[in-house]
Amino acid sequence: MEQKLRDILKTNRSYINNGKLPTYIPELSKADKNALGIYISDLNGEEYGVGDYEYKFTIQSISKVVTLLLALEDRGPEELFQFVGMEPTGDSFNSMMKLEIVSPSKPFNPMINAGAIAVTSLIKGSPEEKFQRIVDLFQKITNNPNLQINENVYLSEKKTGDRNRAMAYFMRDVGVIKGDVEKNLDVYFKQCSLEVTCKDIARIGRFLANDGMLPETGEIVIQSKHAKIAKTFMVTCGMYNASGEFAIEVGIPAKSGVGGGIMALVPGKMGIGVVGPALDDKGNSSAGVKVLRDIADLYNLSIF
Ligand code: DON
């Protein structure tokens, strides 16, 4: 298995050259462009890591799946979907274009930045409590008690996050977000700055593949109906305006982040984490997408 995964890394390494490191969050441009790693964590307890699977990167938009789970547990789908929609946008992840065109105004889905900021604002507790609850959930489902934020990335995001800030203030104006916008944004910037490895995101994938139950203990952490909603959004919106192409070419639920990670899963079978910090023009890891395509091909993983 490891040898096959190593071959996949080798075959797809050249796709790194099709990507670029993001610069809109300056600290992310310091990542190692050539890092490439895979980690697979299956429901039988087998784990495989190859390449730079210990490389640390910030989780970024992959965190949106976990905050969605927490907000669903806190509010239930009926309340949550009053504030955020269920439809893909066909636009980039940080587009604000569609915010104003539906009435009553709400972000199209929880995977784009606007939707994720709204979702984070729905998590219960003071800003400090919210963030602690997010970290606790992450630590639990990754089984990594050392998970913490990368302070430099967090500060860099906070300093340069005016587009997110603009969307958040707009959303308060139309009643999607309540309370202190800056404090809500601060929780969002922190959740995006959590530092992880492929192993951590593979474990998140495995947890979702197991419908919200911790495979080791059998503990139900998230109701399966909420895990199902998150997995569905991963298919329809997880790779933003490349979600359709990814569904055809790879065919498994996945969520990307601008830190270069992609968290993917095969329902009932396994979680897969890949990292490759160079991004394509949709904001997805350029080599990571190809690596997942080859893994899915080799093991016939498409859910379709
Ligand atoms: O808010 C942002 O723009 C980043 N913190 C997260 C965006 C992201 O990861 C999009 N993913 N491909």
Image (cartoon, rainbow, N blue to C red):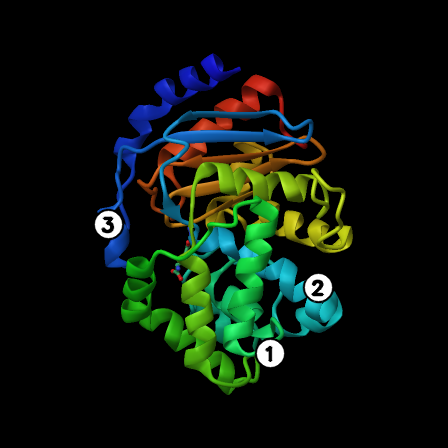
**Pointer 2 with pointer 3, Cβ within 8 A:** no
Q: If you read the primary sequence from the N terminus, does the residue marked by circle 2 or circle 3 appear first? A: 3
**Cα–Cα span, label 1 and label 3:** 38 Å
Q: Which mark is residue 24?
A: none
Give the x, y percent position of residue 86: 64, 60
Amino acid type at mark 2: Glu
| Residue at figure coordinates x 54%, y 80% from the top left | 177
Q: Which residue is mark 2?
A: 73
**Mark 3 secondary-structure assignment:** helix
Amino acid type at mark 3: Ser
Q: Nearer the viewer, mark 1 or mark 3?
A: 3
Tell me the quarter of the picture where residue 133 sits: bottom right
- Horizontally, is 119 left or right of 49 in the view? right
Q: How many marks?
A: 3
| Residue at figure coordinates x 57%, y 58% from the top left | 136
Give the x, y percent position of residue 69: 64, 58
Q: Residues within 10 Å of mark 2 (few under 14, many from 20)?
A: some
Tell me the quarter of the picture where residue 40 sits: top right
Amino acid type at mark 1: Ser
Q: Nearer the viewer, residue 42 or 243?
A: 42
**Mark 2 secondary-structure assignment:** helix
**Pointer 2 with pointer 1, Cβ within 8 A:** no
Q: Nearer the viewer, residue 191 or 266?
A: 191
Camera sees residue 143: yes
| Residue at figure coordinates x 71%, y 53% from the top left | 221
Q: Which residue is mark 1?
A: 103
Q: Nearer the viewer, mark 2 or mark 1?
A: 2
- Horizontally, is 195 left or right of 244 in the view? left
